Amino acid sequence: MTQRAPCYSFTPSKRLTRGLVQVFTGEGKGKTSAALGAVLRALGHGLRVYMVFFMKGDYPYGEFKALAQLPNVDVARFGLTSFCDPGNVRPEEIEQAKKALAAAREAILSGDYDMVVLDEVNVAAAWKLVEVDEVLKLVQDKPQGVELILTGRYADARLVQTADLVTEMVKIKHPYDAGVKSRRGIEY
């Protein structure tokens, strides 16, 4: 017999007094999922969250629909519907990534959010859609009470050094290697 978890009612938490910088990187699956877990936990304590997606445009990712139904979270998506080719980056992809970084900066400095997530920013920096120095400046300018999460493969060594927490997802085995395509509701 399945039991439903009790529904808790509580007042929003006080503002964070010490926000840290977290990096989720590596070749393994789960970087965005880890960030979404942190978002869910923060929302459960009444914190206010802003999540900006780099390079994920209008593709039908399931997390967009779920986040849109939750209180205290704002989502911004930037990028094209096609996947970015790192060997042939288009000007409009750079423009979208710059807009994403500007939106992230505005959210971080606004005083409106306790947690800000920059999903796939590490890839955007590695592929030169944004400059790593601009991301480092954003980390440096972050107010003390804002938790900042940076996700994506290829995290720059300087971001890793600057962060308070770094988790590397290591791929041991993945169904994609056996020809299994991405599945709606599981990988996107």
Image (cartoon, rainbow, N blue to C red):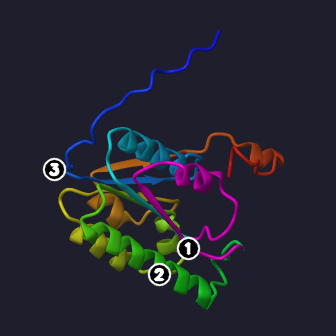
- Residue segment shown in magenta: 55-81
Estimate the spatial distance between the alpha carbons at disc 3 and disc 1, rounded to whole Å. Answer: 30 Å
Residue 125 counted in the magenta span: no
Instruction: Determine crowd level at label 2: few under 14, some 14-19, many 20+ residues with C-alpha closer than 10 A.
Output: some
Left or right of 19? Residue 2 is: right
- Residue beneath label 3, please? 17
Q: Amino acid at mark 3?
A: Thr
Q: Quadrant of the N terminus?
A: top right
Q: Which residue is mark 2?
A: 99
Specify which label sits upstream in the sequence, 1 or 2: 1
Res 168 seen here: no
Hey, which residue is sitting farthest right in the picture? 179
Q: Is residue 44 above or below residue 97?
A: above
x and y percentages locating residue 17 in the rendered image: 15, 50
Ranked by sequence position, the earlier of labels 3 and 1 is 3
Task: Give amino acid for label 2.
Answer: Lys
Which SS class for mark 1?
loop
Q: Percent from the top left, x then y, of residue 75?
A: 49, 62
Spatial separation of the CA atoms under disc 3 and disc 2: 29 Å
Q: Residue at x 33, y 66 (%)?
A: 158
Residue 9 point in image, percent of width and height:
35, 31
Whether pointer 1 and pointer 2 mark residues with C-beta atoms closer than 8 Å, the reply is yes
Of the two numbered discs 3 and 2 on the same chain, state the one appearing first in sequence: 3
Residue to which mark 1 is pinned: 78
Disc 1 to disc 2, how far (Cα)?
7 Å
Rendering coords of residue 171 (x, y %): 60, 44
Q: Residue furthest top?
A: 1
Depth check: give the residue in front, 172 or 47: 47
Q: Is residue 19 above or below residue 143?
A: above
